[in-house]
Amino acid sequence: MILILDFGSQYTQLIARRIREEKVYCQIYPGNKSLNSFSNLEGVKGVIFSGGYGSVYAKNAPWPDPKVWKLGVPILGICYGMQLIAQHLGGKVLPSKYREFGLANVDVECDCYLFDGLNSKETLWMSHGDKLSKMPKGFKITAKSDNSPNAAIEDVSNNIYGVQFHPEVKHSVNGKKIIQNFVFKICGSKRDWTMKSYITDEIKRIKSQVGKSKVLCALSGGVDSSVAAVMLHKAIGKQIFCIYVDHGLQKLGETQRVKKVFGKVFKKNLEIIDAKKIFLSKLKGVVDPEQKRKIIGKTFIDVFERESKKLKGVDFLLQGTIYPDIIESVSIKDAKTPIKSHHNVGGLPEKMKMKLVEPLKFLFKDEVRALGREFKISAEILNRQPFPGPGLAVRVLGEITQEKLSILKEADSIVTEEIMKAGFYEKVWQSFAIMLPVKTVGVMGDVRTYEYVIAIRAVNSDDAMTADWVKLPYELLEKMSSRIINEVKGVNRVVYDISNKPPATIEWE
């Protein structure tokens, strides 16, 4: 595999995506964390240093474990990663007089390994305010731009390479080729990572981890938990017990759907717990989104642990955690605050009685769907749009009340219904409604109203790490707005969110 050391770049996950697309396994690991806790150093074929948000010469700049230089595998540094290589090996990095953000024309040496097969002039994505002012000994320059005379460097004898630009970003025209050259021509990796091989390895790992113990499955009915549950069922059969918690934060009619679909699969090993009052009481008066997520995570665990006591031999909890959950929830030491804590990552209590089983935690959403197809899970489940673990708690902005939840469920149901009728449901990544904590003046039947605002959000994405807002037809937006205002009591205004991720996130909280 390829090991990616993350130094805080917003693009780190894109490096992993590009490598996975080549059917090569890779993992993202905190850039300044000791490699002693990494599980498979023997399997590493190459290391990539990601970009970062700061400067390598800063007082608290993150640096890698010194052990990485002794692994004896090729290293590629990207942006901050290249500057880190240079600074460590005797070069010098200083603030640049002119910062460089966006597309740049770069002259490259096509006869070097990294740029084999490229044109002598390439359009590549830059995002930096520092520059390499002094070359480290043993390196030569392999690319340059008007603002970056040292846009790429290499020391072939020690298999160390660095680029100032970001080949992982789609705007870099031949960036994919650069990554391919590093992964295959320099590291010698093979295209041998497939869903079938993943299933074989993961089922073997699950059996080894679980043994004869019973596993409690946190079933939500969404894509992730459904695929995770079926995978565990394939691995350990009747040792798995599924619990669906009706916390009141689901979509309209979700509990009934779960009973219908999963009752056939798990039969007596599926239990539905009514915990609506518990969750609402815990969330009463809470407005901070991070606090909401942590409360929901802890309450989930409390409910599961309470139920597990009724079953003898339950030592494990299955969760449908996926890679973007982990990437967004966990940051490197000294980095900025995580984007958001996901309920099944940042919300878990430190001392939990059950041990976690997370068979999807290194997979992106499209890979989870591919895994589900290998298990022949129905398209009805696999093609569902992603739904946040904390449910509608992060779509009701501000304090959560039963009134607001009821309003949002009805509005969201209309959005989904009209999106489906228009043939957009499987064409967009996510489409949903958000309950805003404000009221506005309106007029209905010549009578003044003062009621809530509903926002509609529709985005396209490959992996939830970046997203573009969808330009839905005006007629569809008008239909949704008209229905919500006329059919949902308590709403007199509808707005449409036209923000991309970044700088916004897909969910509002």
Image (spheres, rainbow, N blue to C red):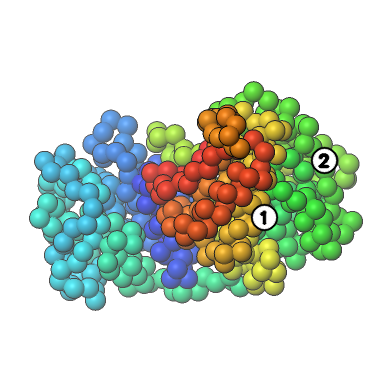
Looking at the image, residue 276 sits to the left or right of residue 419; the answer is right
Q: CA distance from mark 1 to mark 2?
A: 18 Å
Vertical comparison of 397 with 123: above or below: above
Residue 408 is labelled as none
Q: What amino acid is labelled 2 in the image?
A: Asp
Look at 26% across and 39% down and name the residue there.
Answer: 55
Instruction: Give the x, y percent position of residue 256.
Output: 80, 53
Instruction: Give the x, y percent position of residue 225.
Output: 68, 55
Quadrant hosting residue 492: top right
Count of numbered tags: 2
Instruction: Give the x, y percent position of residue 423.
Output: 57, 67
Q: Residues within 10 Å of mark 1 (few under 14, many from 20)?
A: many
Look at 61% across and 37% down and name the residue there.
Answer: 445
Residue found at the very far bottom of the displayed protein: 117
Q: Of callouts 1 and 2, which one flags the residue occurring earlier in the amino acid sequence?
A: 1
Residue placed under numbered mark 2 in the picture: 274
Residue placed under numbered mark 1 in the picture: 222
Looking at the image, residue 386 sits to the left or right of residue 270; the answer is left
Instruction: Give the x, y percent position of residue 504.
Output: 42, 43
